Amino acid sequence: MASVPKEAISRDRIRRVPSGFGWVDHRVVRDHYVERCSHAALALYLFLVTVSDGEGVSWWSERSLSGRLGMDVDRLRQARAELEAADLVAYEHPVWQVLELRRAEA
């Protein structure tokens, strides 16, 4: 099987890590968090990763988040419960925290 060349398609649009903190740890996929969460939970996680500060903290209200994500507040709360159960976020009204992923046990 021939290998696929690893070359950018659009050289003038190469992604750079921004000075902010909006990045997603590749272990979200590798450690199967993606399969454990609904689309709504993953959308909420991506939003929180994007808007959180360097410690993963943000202060978005449920009302604002549900409006931005196009889901009702009950669905948002269900998504939050999924993320908490997966150990991806912590929430204490009105503060959200995206948690550092735990290291896999050896």
Image: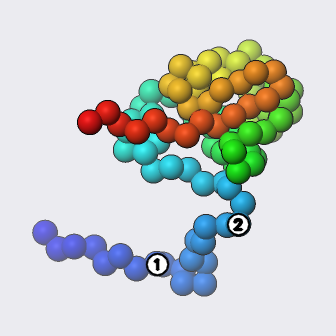
Residue 104 placed where, x, y %?
A: 35, 37
**Mark positioned earlier in the residue sequence (2 or 1):** 1
Residue at mark 2 to residue at mark 1: CA–CA distance: 22 Å
Number of numbered callouts drawn: 2
Q: Position of residue 65 (x, y in %)?
A: 80, 33
Q: Position of residue 42 (x, y in %)?
A: 58, 35
How crowded is the residue under tag 1: few (<14 C-alpha within 10 Å), some, or many (20+)? few
- Name the residue nearer the viewer: 55 or 7: 55
Q: Is residue 29 left or right of residue 13?
A: left
Dot 2: what SS? loop
Mark 1 belongs to which amino acid? Ala
Label number found at residue 19: 2
Q: Is residue 50 left or right of residue 1?
A: right
Q: Nearer the viewer, residue 66 or 105?
A: 105
- Write the residue at 55% across / 40% down: 100
Q: Quadrant of residue 94?
A: top right
> Where 56 falls versus 12 (above or below)?
above
Residue topped by disc 1: 8
